[in-house]
Amino acid sequence: MIEFFSQLGFIALLAFIQNVSFSIVSRSRNRDNVTYHLFAATASNLVWYLTFRYLVMADMSWALLPGYLIGTVSGSLFGVKVAMRIEKMLGATADGHLKSK
């Protein structure tokens, strides 16, 4: 039983990190900073791979779904806040192409 809750917590943590990184990479695609997108895409794809590797190794058990859902939803919400802070620090904007006109 303890092992199950340990697995549930671990997948929730992986899913949280996955969606934080996904939210950041999603926003970075529309910003005027390619370096920001390079790092965001690398991190996002690495965490996606680790998350799905773990799920496959656990035979994609339905029992892990609640942890996965909690992790992904909360990670997505938190990730937007993190992305906004990063963008503010970098001065990365979605309409940077309009500044020169």
Image (tube, rainbow, N blue to C red):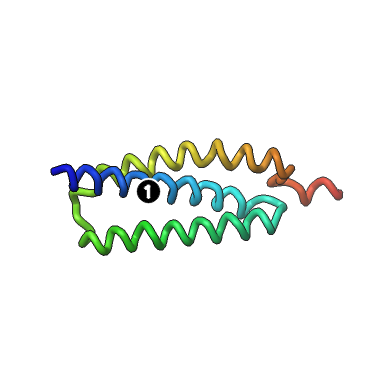
Residue at the location (48% across, 37% down)? 78
| Relative horizontal placement of residue 54, taking residue 4 as reference (left or right) | right
Q: Which residue is drawn at 38% across and 50% down?
A: 14
Helix, strand or loop status at disc 1: helix
In the foreground, 29 or 66: 66
Pick the quarter of the image with the N terminus.
top left
61 or 100: nearer the viewer: 61
Taking the image as drawn, is residue 65 in sight?
no
The residue beneath circle 1 is 15
Where's residue 42, x and y in %? 55, 61
**Badge 1 density bin: few <14, some 14–19, many ≥20, Cα 10 Å:** many
Q: Residue furthest right?
A: 101
Q: What residue type is labelled 1?
A: Ala
Residue with the most extreme left position:
1
Looking at this rendering, what residue extends furthest in the front direction?
2
Residue drawn at the location 18% of the way across and 46% of the way down: 4
Residue 32 pos. (x, y %): 72, 52
Vertical side of 81 occupied by 42: above or below: below
In the image, residue 97 above or below residue 5: below
The answer to which of 13 and 73 lies nearer the viewer is 13
Residue 46: % across, % down:
47, 61
Residue 23 in sight: yes
- For the point 17% across and 43% down, the residue is 2
In x, y percent, where is residue 19? Answer: 44, 47
Number of numbered callouts drawn: 1
For residue 72, side relative to residue 33 (left or right) = left
